[in-house]
Amino acid sequence: APAILNNRPRVLVTRRWPQTVEAELAERFDTVFNVEDRPMSAEDFRDALGKFDAILPTVTDGLGSEAMDVSEARTRILANYGVGFSHIDTDAAKKLGIAVTNTPDVLSECTADLAMTLMLMVARRAGEGERELRAGQWTGWRPTHLVGAKVSGKVLGIVGFGRIGQAMAQRAHFGFGMKILVQNRSRVAQDVLDRYNAVQVDTIEDLLPQCDFVSLHCPGGAANRHLINSHRLDLMKPGAFLINTARGEVIDEHALAQALMFDCIGGAALDVFDGEPKVAPILLDCDNLVMLPHLGSATEETRTAMGMRVLDNLVDFFEGRTPGDQVA
Ligand code: DGY
C-alpha cells in the first residue's frame, strides 16, 4: 500500500524468524533484525521504544514495567510473535499509547498436538524408556517392564477452554475416547461443550479430584501465578498426571517436585517453566516428569503462520485499521 511504501515504518524484530517471513517484513518495512538472536535487556527496550515505530517481541522478551519505564515512546505497536502476552506490561503500553497484538488460532493445533505428545509420553513412560535404552540398560521385554497408565477412555480435565483447550478436547475426545471436564473463568457456550461431550465444572477444586489427566491451557501472568499449588496438587487423584503447555508460573514447581517425589500424583509433563530457560534443579531429580524446551508451536508451518499473522497485524495497524488480534 502506498502509505507504507512512501513512508516505511521502522520495525524492530527481536529474534530471528522463519526466512520467508523475514523476507516479507524486510520488503514492506524498514526492518532491523536482532541478528545475534539473543533476548534483549530492559535497557535495550527502553532505547528501542524511542527509535522504532513497531517492536515485534517474543515470550523471551521481558517487556515488564522496567523495560517500559519511559516517559514517551516513538513506538506505536508491540506486535507479539506468540499468543501468550503475559511478558508485556499492557497497562504501561496503554499509558504510552502503544497497541499490543498477538498471534492466536494459527498455533492452536500444534500446541494441542504437543500437549497430547506430553500426555502420552508421561503416561506411557516414554522418556524413562528412551533414557534407559540410550544408556544401554535395556535388558529386554518383560511383563513388568516400564508399565504405565492407559490413556484411552480416561477422564481429562482441561483448565482454560480457549482455542488451545478446545483443540486438546477435540483430540482427546475423538482420538482417544476420553471424557472431558472443563474449568474456565467464564461460562462456555453449551454447543461448544457439546461438540466434545464435555462438562464444565465451577471451580478447579471441583475438577481436580475427578481427573486422571489435567492439562493446563489458561493464560499466564499474575492472576494465574501458582494456580496449581501444593493444596491443589493434594486434590488430584493419586496416580493422576499433570500437563502444562501454558506458562511456567501457573505451577508452583517446588510443590510439584514434592508431589512427584512422594508419588502423590503419577507424573507430570512440562513444556514451559517458571523463569525459563532456567529449570529448577529439583525438577531434574524427578523421574516421573517429562520436560521439553518450550516447543508447543515449534513446527515449520506454525512458526511461519505466526509470522504472517504478525505481518497482517502490522499492515492493518499502519494502514489505519484496527488489527484483528489487538489485545490491548
Ligand atoms: C505462545 O505463543 O504463547 C508461545 O508460548 C510462545 O510465546
Image (tube, rainbow, N blue to C red):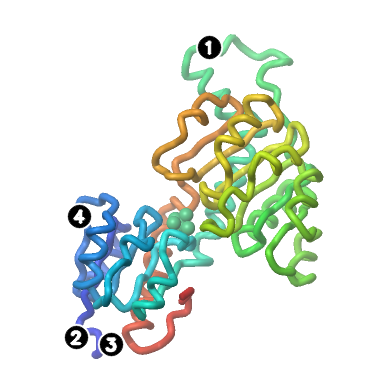
The Cα–Cα distance between marks 1 and 2, rounded to whole angstroms, is 64 Å
Could you tell me which secondary element the residue under label 2 belongs to?
loop
Q: Which residue is mark 2?
A: 7
**Badge 1 density bin: few <14, some 14–19, many ≥20, Cα 10 Å:** few
The numbered mark, 4 or 2, whose residue comes first in the sequence reads 2
Tell me if residue 115 comes above or below residue 314 in the rendering: above
Please report the residue visible at 51 percent of the width from the left and 36 percent of the height from the top. 291
Q: Amino acid at mark 1?
A: Gln
Q: Nearer the viewer, residue 17 or 269?
A: 269
Q: Amino acid at mark 3?
A: Ala
Please report the residue visible at 77 percent of the width from the left and 48 percent of the height from the top. 178
The numbered mark, 3 or 2, whose residue comes first in the sequence reads 3
The numbered mark, 1 or 2, whose residue comes first in the sequence reads 2
Q: Which residue is mark 1?
A: 137
**Badge 4 density bin: few <14, some 14–19, many ≥20, Cα 10 Å:** few
Tell me if residue 266 comes above or below residue 94 in the rendering: above
